[in-house]
Amino acid sequence: NRQIRLAARPRGEVKPGDWAHVTVDAGAPGDGQFAGRTLLISLDPAMRGWLDDRPSYLPPVGIDEVMRAGTLVEVTESKHPDYAVGDFVVGTFGVQEHVVSDGRGALKVDKPLPTYLGALGMPGMTAYFGLLEVGALKEGETVVVSGAAGAVGSVVGQIAKVKGCRVIGIAGGPEKTALLTDELGFDVGIDYRADDVRKAIRAAAPDGVDVYFDNVGGDILDAALANLAMHGRVVICGAISQYNADEPVPGPSNYLSLLVRRGRMEGFIVFDYVKRYPEAAAELAAWIAEGRIVLKEHVVKGTVDDFPATLNMLFRGENVGKLVLDVT
Ligand code: NDP
């Protein structure tokens, strides 16, 4: 059983030497357990935070522990009444070729599709609850989303279109901004590498931004704050521009626009909505079937040994849509 374990706490971007590649015995399932073969591994920006030894919403991954990751596995042997050989299961099974599990926190799915790690998995749930619950989106409002060509952002923008909103997406580079408007139905794409983001938001949303869904933090958060509409909401989903920082980062200098505009800024963790995932998944699946949400998935073929290099793609903007490592 090949495994990727954390060898050292990274400083800045995660380096190859921060990981250990080891081979151990796969083990066999006991009563109430099943064994599974890993097919797909999810790559998530949050993984960077799990490597730091500081208080967070989950304990950090320990040194010499198998790297935490959401995966899709196929059951190869079972002594668990709810799982049969050939079942496909999504769970937090870690970066390894084989897993033995009691099924806690796991979910059976019908097919081994990357979508179950993307739009119908954790990122889709994040988009749905972040936008509709935390952002309290109303029909016809103006929405800005950063990281717009990514797993969460691409779904956020498309849900907002389903809800009849004006949608402005911010992403890096002309290919990604073209994707937003040409394929995903966004109204405007802003290239944060080339454009003055603050001015571009003002031009695209002259009456202000009702909901800003923030995936990146930093200067882009400041630019959005400067353009908030009255009673605007800022959804703090993530801040990938800061995850590799090894020094304290400055706070948003435009936060007083929350005061002037009587706005609100609120963070959330998707896991708090776990009981309601089925309701979100059903609605998202219907929109996908109707063609109202287009799936964007970036599947890299490889082995578990390719996990470290694939993870770094997220921090270089090398993925379009949900990044998944296919180890079949
Ligand atoms: P993405 O698929 O969006 O991949 C990351 C993207 O971030 C890259 O493609 C890149 O796109 C962009 N990016 C990287 N570095 C920077 C930078 N310095 N400045 C601006 N953009 C950058 O990842 P996810 O959709 O999985 O995650 C998006 C966000 O949602 C993350 O912040 C993540 O932590 C957060 N999240 C939060 C959850 C919660 O419960 N609160 C749950 C799940 C995710 P580009 O080329 O456009 O720069």
Image (cartoon, rainbow, N blue to C red):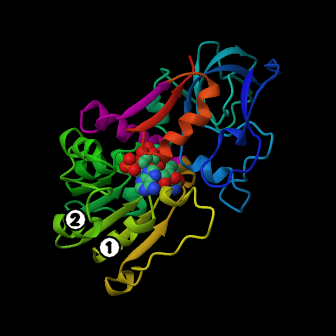
Judging by the rendered image, the residue that carries numbered circle 2 is 200
Q: Is residue 103 magenta?
A: no
Describe residue 34's horizontal placement relative to residue 74 as left or right: right
- Mark closer to the chain start, 2 or 1: 2
Of the 4 image quadrants, the one containing the N terminus is top right
Numbered range of the magenta stretch:
275-300
SS category of the residue bearing label 2: helix
Placement of 114 over or under 120, stated as above or below: above
Q: Residue at x 33, y 87 (%)?
A: 260
Q: Residue furthest bottom?
A: 260
Quarter of the figure with residue 138: bottom left
Q: Residue at x 33, y 69 (%)?
A: 224
Q: Residue 2 appears at what percent x and percent y? A: 72, 23
Judging by the rendered image, the residue that carries numbered circle 1 is 232
| Amino acid under disc 1 | Gly
Placement of 242 over or under 163, stated as above or below: below
SS category of the residue bearing label 1: strand
